[in-house]
Image (tube, rainbow, N blue to C red):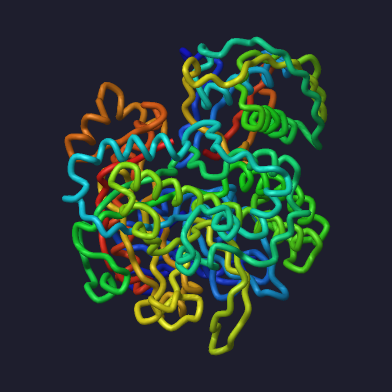
Amino acid sequence: MNRSRLNKLSDTLWEIPPTGGMRVPAHLYATERMIDTILADNAPEQAANVAHLPGIVRASLAMPDIHWGYGFPIGGVAAFDAHDGVISPGGVGYDINCGVRLMASPLTRQDLGPHLRRLVEELFRRVPSGVGSAGPLKLTPKQMRQVAVEGAGWALRQGHGTPGDLAYMEEHGCIGGADPQRVSERAYERGAGQLGTLGSGNHFLEIGYVSEIDDAAAARTLGLALDQLTVIIHTGSRGFGHQTCEDYLGLMDRAVGKYRIALPDRQLACAPIHSEEGQAYLGAMRCAINYAFANRQVIAHRVREAFAAVLGPGAGSAALRTVYEVAHNIAKFETHDVNGESRKVCVHRKGATRAYAPGRPEVPAAYQAIGQPVLIPGDMGRYSYVLTGTPRAMAETFGSTCHGAGRAMSRHQALKAGRGRDLLRELAGRGIVVQAQDRRTLAEEMPDAYKDVAVVVDTCARAGLSNKVAQLKPLGCVKG
Amino acid sequence: MRRPAWLEPVDHTADAGFVVGAATLPQLFERAARGLFALIGDLDTVRGIDEECIAITAQDLPALMVQWLSELNYRHQTLQRVYGRFAVESVTPTSLTARVRGEPIDRARHRLYTEVKAITFHGLQVDQVGRRWRARVIVDL
């Protein structure tokens, strides 16, 4: 996209004014230094395309980690009026409720000391990852339907977790309105053996430590102190969600003609929220949301078992506390102030994270004063961040912020760059123990393949969309 | 597997894809299937032990390509099998029948790289250029 199409509104905000069929402007959050790279990609055009959709409210929004997606850009946020708006599977993505959980141990990295390698090996053994990763749980059709409705609560009923976990998850680990009848048999088949598994691609399990604190009061509220051990789980709804998205993209493609929705790109396929197709997708998508909550809950349980096995019984169970869990591929009904009026909207976040301000009732009671924690994973060699939501995010982005670093190299480029290098040894030299199913995955996911997440996080902080609380550095990583 | 001349990787920042060329339409679908499984793992380690028959339909040729590769990915994931040999018996713009050969996943013997979440319609092309057929497919990883 040509820079002449943009108006610069501030140091961190750019506007694509409405032209043609755009119903609202598109707003891109980026600094002067980032904008040319962002414009070189097709993503700003995609953000402008989203602005054509019926019922879109305020603006089509793009976070600083925006990049080219299918129809909707990744790093995009769009809210649609709950009565007149649309729902779109492309606005959520294939990995429905892909998300991140942060856990914190009372132990420090000094306590971990010589046990690191054994702990990584134990995690690798207990949490299946990689191609066709199937867990020890093989769910019956009845159990699959229970997971789809109950989410993380189902896992808890099986003894996978501690009661305190649910209070620290977005939606308390279970979204209402899930309709198991709307999910295909294929999706159930793909998900039946995958609960409690990481999968592959950019998903990971990481042991790290608190390396820097930016907001001491907020860090204290979250129970985070320098050198404290942390665990990050990044995965989603596995084949269950992927199949659900695939099933409904086809249905929505036909709905576009039926409801005479004019689209600038066929991949924005959508249906009115109150249509039969829209309701069916909502019912099925919520099942996948719940499956992902249960998946991360089971993995968290396995992580606790691994901690207990390596560091002693006292290191597992409730000692490894859930700090928070966020979703970054999701569509939900939320109430927001729009032009001084309270409106119910369906917020699509595709590669974007909810970032609610202090005082919102959805924020856990213990975090009311600081706002909702936001977890932004980086790459396996550098760092990740803990942020909190702000009133500015509520006012401008429907309470949303970024979700990650974004890739700097394609997988093919990364493979070339990794040729002849011993990445395991390089990472070990930096004190990071990595176990991956295959060395090719490791090359594709190496730190150089990703942009510096600090740039994305700093831009969100400068734009006022989130506050920086703490930086986490990796010590050990499990990759699929 | 050494990359054959008819298979080119597509450089996509977040995901992956391939372009395949072929003399005939059945060959194009066979090669696209090989392109998919070359992304998933090393095809040289896969033996074609058991045979399965596949029959699918779709509304047009590009949709048929997505349907064909999605069917193979679904079988790979739910049956925990890898496939290495593909014989397309008939193709029309809306239907396909094929026999495929593969075997159960054996992590000790099969080198597997990545899971494919889905076959997308993004930048999808299935067309005839002169006398040759060409397909471009991007998958979500």
The location of residue A140, given as percent across then percent down, is 70, 43
The location of residue A465, given as percent across then percent down, is 38, 72
Is B71 left, or right, of A442 in this rendering?
Answer: right
Which sits in the foreground, B5 or A418?
A418
Determine the residue positioned at 51% across, 49% down: A298
The location of residue A198, given as percent across then percent down, is 48, 42
Q: How many marks?
A: 0
User: Where is A243 relative to A232, above or below?
Assistant: above
Is A447 left, or right, of A111 in this rendering?
Answer: right
Which sits in the foreground, A92 or A318?
A318
Is A399 left, or right, of B119 in this rendering?
Answer: left
Residue lying at the far bottom in this picture: please name it.
A340
Q: From where the camera sits, is residue A91 visible?
A: no
Determine the residue positioned at 49% across, 21% down: B107
Residue lying at the far front in this picture: please name it.
A313
The location of residue A456, given as percent across then percent down, is 33, 58
Which sits in the foreground, A433 or A28?
A433
Q: From where the camera sits, is residue A60 visible?
A: yes
Determine the residue positioned at 44% across, 49% down: A234
Residue A281 quadrant = bottom right
Q: Quadrant of the C terminus of chain A?
A: top left
User: Where is A216 relative to A313, above or below?
Assistant: below
User: Where is A418 relative to A27, above or below?
Assistant: above
Determine the residue positioned at 54% across, 89% down: A340
Which sits in the foreground, B76 or B105?
B105
